Amino acid sequence: MTPTAKTEPASTELALADIVGEACMGLGAGSTVMLQLALRPVGLGVAEHSATLNRPLDRLRTTATFVICMVLGTEAERQAVGRMVNKAHVPVRSEHYNAFDADAQLWVAATLARNFEQMYERTFGPLSDESRERIYRDSWVFGTILQVTPDMWPPTRAEFEDYWTSMQAKLSAEPAVQDYARQLLTTRGKPLIAKPLMPIQSLMTRGNLTREQRVLLGLPWTVRDQKRYDFFWRVFPPVYRRIPGFLRTFGARVNLFDMRLRMKLGRRVI
């Protein structure tokens, strides 16, 4: 199902599969990455090992593939992609971090869960309590496909909020991570096709964060930025909701098709 009304009907319970393919979810991708970087083991591991700065479009594809596959793929596809991620994580380790650290993986998965809920509600309006609980529970797969066990997740959405609040005090960012975060938002080294989108991506990435999170990551924010950000969220939702659902979810279907074709041809997926 693809929601078209501003506010979800009371009788409708949405699952993550109903919303994960919405193009508007991409507006939270940058801030989700920034939140992940703000946990020291994740930030250092990414800053020292990620190839995003060298091949940003490919990393965007692989990240989207992981997310879409975990929700819309078959169980066999999820397991296959999970094994690919584990293989890619093998060299990501040092005395300060290990990509197989389940607590760090829980935080990464939690940022994804948070993004889906926030971007949906900003665009379509409040979720019902039932949908919020269902979408949160569906998001566990982003961690449990790797090393996170189900018992590590806060069992309810309300308890997840407590976990999220408690994690804010554990966030930090070393200079190397701050520098990496700023590089992600510049046009330097980005493909020509991506450069026109960088201003809006930068605005959304920084604006979706709290003031404290921006300060932590060393990301600038001005009064003008806030006005532009507020204006965007006044104008974007009613325009986006008028776009037919099959067009809004076209990118996710293409990504799923690409993943399956790559698997069939034996080409790299992750």
Image (tube, rainbow, N blue to C red):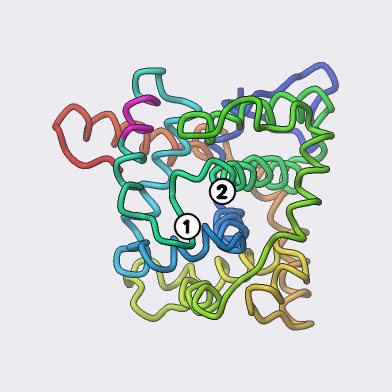
Q: Residue furthest front?
A: 95
Please name the residue shown 61% across and 65% down the image. Answer: 205
Quick check: is 240 in the magenta stretch? no
Crowd tier of the residue under label 1, counting other residues whose Cα lies within 10 Å: few below 14, some 14–19, many 20 or above: some
Label 2 – label 1 distance at C-alpha: 9 Å
When the figure is inspected, residue 241 is found, relative to residue 211, above or below; the finding is above
Q: Quadrant of residue 103?
A: top right
Label 2 amino acid?
Ala
Name the residue tied to disc 2. Answer: 104
Question: Nearest the camera: 100 or 198?
Answer: 100
Element assignment for label 2: helix
Q: Residue at x 59, y 55 (%)?
A: 32
Quarter of the rendering occupied by the N terminus: top right
Quarter-of-image position of residue 242: top right
Mark 2 touches mark 1? (CB < 8 Å): yes
In the rendered image, residue 179, in percent from the top left (x then y), is placed at 50, 79
Q: Determine which residue is flagged by label 1.
A: 97
